[in-house]
Amino acid sequence: MGSANTVGFDVSGLVPAPVTPFTRDGAVDYPAIQRLGSWLGSIEGVKGLVVLGHAGEGTFLTQDEQIAVIKAFVKSTDGRVPVIAGITGEGTEVAALEAKRAREAGAAAGLLYPSHGWLRFGYQPGAPQDRYRRVYEVSGLPLILFQYPDNTKATYNLQTMLDISAQPGVFAMKNGVRNMRRWDTEIPVIRKQRPELQILTCHDEYLLHTAFDVDGMLVGYGNIAPELLLELIAAGKAQDYKKARAVHDKLLPVTKAVYHRGSHMEGTVALKHALVARGILDHATVRSPLLPLEDGAEKEINLAVAASQLPRVA
């Protein structure tokens, strides 16, 4: 898709980014992956699952674990929805080989992260374009462009996004710029110049603002409230602000309990507590450098899930 692209598939809906469950002693919990993946994959309107992302603690796993997690989520969905792998390697060649392994493990696409040294130092002009080119060239894995927040040096300017989205293999964009001035001015330009590029918001804490401009949502939030997020996507596509606002307000207790914490890192821990409240996980074990939340957080999240009327999953 995009001006030069013929690869990819339909992600115009909800694309949850599942957590990676762990046992209490810290190993990957494959039966819990089966429960989580089979539930999310069975919901009409879910168009794919992005594993090994921030919510999935992907960079905290060994290489063997990463491959096994991809395979486990592929098995859990039983072919109903594609599994997309977060590709996070620092060096371009390292990321390209990671993408190749992901494809061999059954991933249908990759969400390509920026090289994380760029967060501190920025990048040379043309380096992001080269990263996407090389990773696709080596792996053949269709790619989703990942736009990082505006307050980082790894954010891409408008021309860089247009360049990447015109390259072979790039069929969608996960935009998390978190600067609404840029969002409001850049998304219409990208829409006009790259009409076949599927645009997904990943603004878990700004879903109402961004719901009206996108094809769907690629969010960790999709773990815990897929039913209501699908209602919000439908309202956004219908340009029905009243309905979208009602869904937003219903979800607000959960949004505050999960995404209005100190950082998105804490949000990952909170996601696991919310999945416990919904009956999918038995406990909220995370892997270092994530740490358990403060005393009282679990009760707060449980109350928020109840207030938003999200039922336990049978």
Image (cartoon, rainbow, N blue to C red):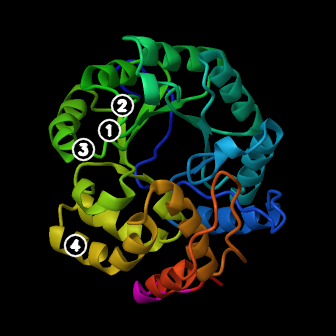
Between disc 4 and disc 1, the foreground one is 1
**In the rendered structure, are the residues bearing label 2 and label 1 in contact, judged by CB atoms less than 8 Å apart?**
yes
Q: Residue at x 64, y 78 (%)?
A: 276
Observer-nearest residue: 196 or 245?
245
Residue type at mark 3? Asn
Q: Residue at x 48, y 68 (%)?
A: 226
Q: Disc 2 to disc 1, how far (Cα)?
A: 8 Å
According to the image, label 4 marks what residue?
245
Q: Is residue 38 magenta?
A: no
Give the residues in magenta: 306-311
Q: Earlier in the sequence, mark 4 or mark 1?
A: 1
Q: Disc 3 to disc 1, how far (Cα)?
A: 8 Å
Residue 38 higher or lower than 190, as above or below: below
According to the image, label 1 marks what residue?
151
Residue type at mark 2? Thr
Horizontal relation, residue 236 to residue 167: left or right: left
According to the image, label 2 marks what residue?
155
Q: Disc 4 to disc 2, how far (Cα)?
A: 29 Å
